[in-house]
Amino acid sequence: MATIPFIQCKIFPVEQTADYLEKRFIKHLRLLRSGQVGQPAHEGKLLGVDNHERHETRITHLDRRKVRMRVEKLITCRQEASGMGHLQEDERERLTALAGGVRLATVKTEHQADEIAAALHDEMPWMGPATEQVWRAMRRSVREGPTSF
């Protein structure tokens, strides 16, 4: 079955919480201050720089505050860029499941199209005009032969 995009938004990794980002930024700040940015891990060992020295790099309260503010700004910008910032958390989770697209199903007979339309109408009677459009499109796809409507 073919897969088509369902939503057009940018979805960021769920595991990148504010705490995760803050720890990552502080770790990077330590690397910057110890002069090890851009050096592969094995080079640091060859040069005699150990992990203990990297952790000795002092991070002040002011540094942590700046990092926290940058993380908050990053999260705000991510929410705006995603296009889903206005949604509730549970709504975002449900839409995230559809981020990879949805699979198209083939309606094989007009009878199957009628059953699907009836089930849709039973679930959402207030969507009658939309259900009718879907029903007609399904029946047309059976008659004309496209793989999906």
Image: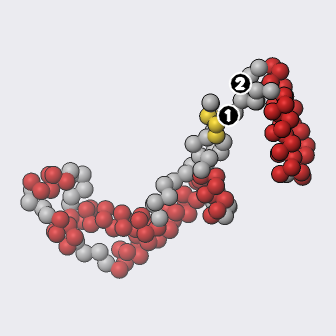
Q: Quadrant of residue 112?
A: top right
The reply to whether the C-beta atoms of the residues labelled 2 and 1 are less than 8 Å apart is: yes
Q: Quadrant of residue 85?
A: bottom right
Counting other residues with Cα less than 10 Å from the Cα at mark 1, is it few (<14), some (14-19), or many (20 or more)? few
Closer to us: 109 or 48: 109
Compared across the picture, whether 5 is left or right of 116 comes to left
| Mark toward the start of the polypeptide (2 vs 1) | 1
Closer to us: 100 or 141: 141
Q: Residue at x 64, y 40 (%)?
A: 102
Mark 2: secondary structure: loop
Label 1 amino acid? Leu
Compared across the picture, whether 30 is left or right of 50 comes to right
Quadrant of the rendering where the C terminus is positioned: top right
Closer to us: 107 or 92: 107
- Measure the C-alpha gap from mark 2 to mark 1: 9 Å
Mark 1: secondary structure: loop
Q: Residue at x 64, y 52 (%)?
A: 95
Image mark count: 2
Compared across the picture, whether 84 is left or right of 15 comes to right
What x and y, as percent, mark residue 43?
14, 52
Compared across the picture, whether 131 is left or right of 93 comes to right
Counting other residues with Cα less than 10 Å from the Cα at mark 2, is it few (<14), some (14-19), or many (20 or more)? some
Q: Residue at x 9, y 56 (%)?
A: 47
Q: Which label number is shown at residue 147? A: 2
Q: Which label number is shown at residue 34? A: none
| Circle 1 residue | 104
Label 2 amino acid? Thr
Q: Residue at x 76, y 26 (%)?
A: 108
What x and y, as percent, mark residue 57?
22, 71
